[in-house]
Image (cartoon, rainbow, N blue to C red):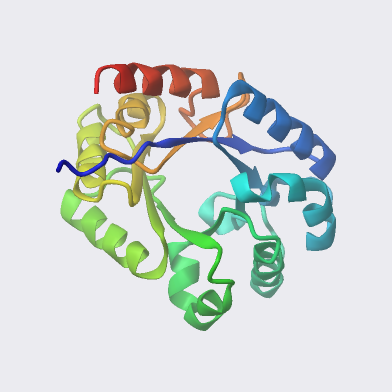
Amino acid sequence: MAKRKVQSRVCASIGADSVAEMAQKAENALHFGADLVEFRIDRLAQRVTPLEIGRSLGEFSRRAVLTVRPAREGGGFTGSEIERLSQISELARTAPAYIDVELATARENQRWLGALPRRVDKIISWHDPAGTPAISALRRTAEEGLEMGAVAKVVTTAKSVDDNATTLRLCSEFPGRVVSFCMGELGLPSRLMSMFFQSPILYSALPNEPVAPGQLSIQTMLAFRSLIQEHD
C-alpha cells in the first residue's frame, strides 16, 4: 500500500497592534479558508499579559501558532529573554496547536523547552536572512530541530532562483516534518512548490498584508493546493 501523503496546511501569519485587531484578522483568515493562524505576539504594539491574550484569542487555540520572535531573530520583541521565555511558557498553557521556538533558543534553554506542555507541538525554527547554505548544512539544521520539536522550520533567503531547489530538496527528504522555503521575491517558487513535497505548513498572509518578504496570500496558496490535489 502506498504511503498516504501529508496534506499541507495553509497558515495565515498575522501581525496587529492589539489583540482585538488580531482576533478580527484571525476571523478573516479562517473565513478565507486558512487552516491555521500564526499570531505574531511579538508584533503587538500594546503590552498585554498572556492571560489577556488567552482571553482574546482562546477561541482560535486549536488552530493557532503562537510566535514571540525576538529582535535578534528579526522579530519585534525587545524585552528581556527571561520575560520572553516566561511569556511563551504562559501562552503554551492556552493549548495552541503549535508554539514556535527558535533553534538557538531551544539549544540554550533545553530544560525550559522540556518543561513546556507536551500536548503542544513545537515548531523549531531557523532563519538565514543572508542567503541559502548548502543542503548538507540545512539537513543538519533540520535534523537538530526535529530532535526537539514536531516540526522543523528552515527558512533561507534566495539570492538566485537556484536556491529554491535547495530548500525544496530539504522538504522532499523530510516529508510532512520539515517546512523549508526561501524568503524574498526570488523565493516565490519554493513557497508554492513546497506543498508538492509535503511541507506540513504553508505560510501565507491576508490580502496585501504580508508579514515576511515574499509571502503570498491565503487565496493564492489555497488555489495552488487545490490544483495539486486535483492532479495528484
Image position, residue 137 (x, y; %): 22, 57
Instruction: Identify which residue is drawn at 54% across, 35% down.
Output: 35
Position of 74 relative to 91 (above/below):
above
Instruction: Identify which residue is drawn at 16% across, 41% down.
Output: 2
Image position, residue 170 (x, y; %): 23, 46
Looking at the picture, tell me which residue is in the foreground, 229 or 216.
229
Image position, residue 94 (x, y; %): 70, 61
Question: Does residue 49 appear in this view?
Answer: no
Image position, residue 183 (x, y; %): 40, 35
Position of 83 relative to 1 (above/below):
below
Q: Is residue 15 left or right of residue 213?
A: right
Query: In the picture, residue 112 is in which quadrant?
Result: bottom right
Q: Is residue 18 left or right of residue 112?
A: right
The C terminus sits in image quarter? top left
Looking at the picture, tell me which residue is in the foreground, 38 or 82.
38
Instruction: Identify which residue is drawn at 71% across, 71% down.
Output: 83
Q: Is residue 51 left or right of residue 13?
A: right
Looking at the picture, tell me which residue is in the foreground, 79 or 24.
24
Position of 102 relative to 187 (above/below):
below
The N terminus sits in image quarter? top left
Q: Is residue 3 left or right of residue 188?
A: left
Query: In the picture, residue 192 is in which quadrant?
Result: top left
Question: Does residue 60 appear in this view?
Answer: yes
